[in-house]
Amino acid sequence: MAREHKTNGRPPADTWSAYQEGLTAFDAARFFDAITLLTSIRDADGLLGSLARFYLGQAQLYYGVSELRAGRNAAAARHFSIAREINPKASGLSRFIAACHAGQGRFDRAAAELERAADAGLGDADQPIRLAHAFARDGKLPRAVETLVRAIDDQPHRIDVRLQLGLL
């Protein structure tokens, strides 16, 4: 017969321990360790599970940034994708994923990622410029020009967009 675990409404001690150790690793910028520990409790219920998922997403983001800086684009993209899976409304993740694709010479995928973010309302002010550059690097100069012209129409005061159009 299975033994029932009584928690008095609290998570089991091993869940608390994993959370505390995961947060300690996160605070010490040991993001890989934080990912390992927090992944083990990401499905916990209640506030502890919500906090574990939040910090797990942040650890995935920061570890992805370190992988991107080291030139490990594919690994970085995996971490950014997991972070987006945890927090689909995080706007900066598409920019990082697009940078990973661009770093691998996959400008078509970079453009698709930036377009997906724009369609989801997750773009930022520089998104049209990055998208235009991805199109240009992918050999789609007319789409690049169209993207910048549309951005100028939407925000005529943006001198930086006009400059980028002139540089194409």
Image (cartoon, rainbow, N blue to C red):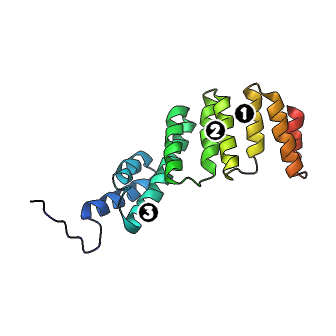
Disc ID at residue 98: 2
Check disc 1 and give the amino acid type: Ala
Q: Earlier in the sequence, mark 3 or mark 2?
A: 3
Q: Quadrant of the C terminus?
A: top right
Residue shown at 62%/31% (left/top)? Answer: 103
Q: Tell me the CA gap for discs 1 and 2.
A: 9 Å
Q: Is residue 91 above or below residue 72?
A: below
Report if the CB atoms under discs 3 and 2 are less than 8 Å apart: no
Label 3, secondary structure: give it: helix
Q: Earlier in the sequence, mark 1 or mark 2?
A: 2
x and y percentages locating residue 84 in the rendered image: 54, 49
User: Badge 2, how many Cα within 10 Å: few under 14, some, many 20+?
Assistant: many
Residue 125 located left or right of residue 27:
right
Q: Earlier in the sequence, mark 3 or mark 1?
A: 3
Residue shown at 70%/47% (left/top)? Answer: 118
x and y percentages locating residue 97 in the rendered image: 59, 40
Residue 142 located left or right of residue 41:
right
In depth, the one of 116 and 87 nearer the eye is 116
Report if the CB atoms under discs 1 and 2 are less than 8 Å apart: yes
x and y percentages locating residue 73 in the rendered image: 55, 33
In depth, the one of 92 and 143 nearer the eye is 143
Q: In the figure, residue 45 lies in which quadrant?
A: bottom left
For disc 1, the marked residue is 134
Disc ID at residue 51: 3
Residue shown at 35%/60% (left/top)? Answer: 44
Q: Tell me the CA gap for discs 3 and 2.
A: 27 Å
x and y percentages locating residue 79 in the rendered image: 49, 42
For this orientation, the residue located farthest to the left is: 1
In depth, the one of 117 and 29 nearer the eye is 117
User: Badge 1, how many Cα within 10 Å: few under 14, some, many 20+?
Assistant: many
Q: Tell me the CA gap for discs 3 and 1.
A: 36 Å
Q: Can the viewer see residue 17?
A: yes
